[in-house]
Amino acid sequence: MAYHPPKSRDEAVATDRHDILAHAREAFDMEGGLVYLVGHSLGPATHNALDALHQAAHYDWRRGLVRSWNTADWFTLAKRTGGQLARLVGAKPAEIMIADSVSANLYKLASAAGSLAASSDLIVEEDEFPTDQYVIEALAGMSGVTFHRAAPGEGLGKLAETGGVLVHSLINYRTGALRDMAAAEKIAADCGGVIVWDLSHATGVVDVSLSKAGARLAAGCTYKYLNGGPGAPSFLYVRKDLTGKLESPLPGWMGHARPFAFEATYTPAEDITRFANGTPPILSLAALSGALEAFEALDISLVVAKAQALGDLVPRRAGELGLDIRSPLDASKRGGHVSFAHPNAHEIVRALAARNILADFRAPDTIRFGLSPLFLRFIDVWDAMDALADILETKSWDKDEYRKRAAVT
């Protein structure tokens, strides 16, 4: 099926009627009447995720107790869930491990990457997601190596100059701009540098082909487009031929070759398990495993095509409203969210929420619409843009109650 952004509300309804992915929406347990444009921040719950969580908590934990490490196979759940995710990033099951947070995994991979790179320099661009910058700058300070905070768009140039390690997001968290992974990896190969990819805003909504692009290391979160739930553990990727050559800077008992031998000295596991640390978060893993089932029968190329068409609706209509569009207009160069700016962005997002349309605000002036194709319909996006137009025209955003900011925005 070829997706095309509708040009009228009637066309939006017709497009939804013939959408080959329409059935995917049935996997989600969502409030009726809600337009949820924040799947790029926290994906909604699926029925299977909730069922898996209930099974793990009420039966495996409540009844099985410690026996469930064996009877419910908790011990291998992180690896098995990684295997479920592998197809979504173009990797082999043995190359993906679910563990820890994105921050921790970026630290581990960037540290380990130093043994592969031509130099020990660590690089990050100044418009990267803040945690990426914090982690890499701290790692450089603790390791006594040179840290470079490159200007936006200049990280690859600094990598080519130094042959160091670059932490690079495939999709910019503010603008949604999509980078060319294969082209970047070619630069890294030519200079002897290494790229650690942050796939947090990419997995589940764009075509991620780690093996095909020549990527060596990557990490990403699972609670956005993968719908793993709040605080769901991160994943990391290590190309299989490199696994035995890299050492984790945070060895833990679950990364040991024989964790239940309880040996005093550390012997890393031969496979990607060596990047595990402590006891895995079983309840979160169970929910994530259930959530990933929503992708199992889907053609990822259709998921990407629908996300692009949904996304095309936003800049087209936002431009008509005089908004400052911050995302690429070319869908092939854009991820799953579209950003635009307005001086009263925070108040506008609050006004949308009052109409049961959830979007998000990023200081100082950015509104992001996340276009998660599994549960969003074209009519949802069309109606959200109609509501936005009305809010701007009537200035219904101009209320004191909308100026108050919560702890989380």
Image (cartoon, rainbow, N blue to C red):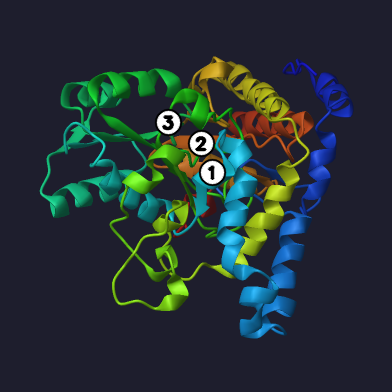
Q: Amino acid at mark 2?
A: Ile
- Which of label 3 and label 1 is nearer to you? 3
Quick check: marks 3 and 1 in contact, CB under 8 Å?
Answer: no
Whether residue 387 sits left or right of residue 117 in the image: it is right
Q: Amino acid at mark 3?
A: Ala
Question: x, y percentage for residue 199?
Answer: 47, 38
Q: Which residue is mark 1?
A: 360
Q: Is residue 45 visible?
A: no
Q: Which residue is painted at 73% across and 64% down in the image?
A: 52
Q: Earlier in the sequence, mark 2 or mark 1?
A: 1
Q: Which residue is painted at 38% across and 40% down in the image?
A: 242
Residue nearer the viewer, 93 or 151 = 93
Q: Amino acid at mark 1?
A: Asp
Question: x, y percentage for residue 134?
Answer: 27, 49
Quick check: marks 2 and 3 in contact, CB under 8 Å?
Answer: no
Q: Residues within 10 Å of mark 3 (few under 14, many from 20)?
A: many
Q: Secondary structure at mark 2?
A: strand
Q: Earlier in the sequence, mark 3 or mark 1?
A: 3
Q: Which residue is mark 3?
A: 215
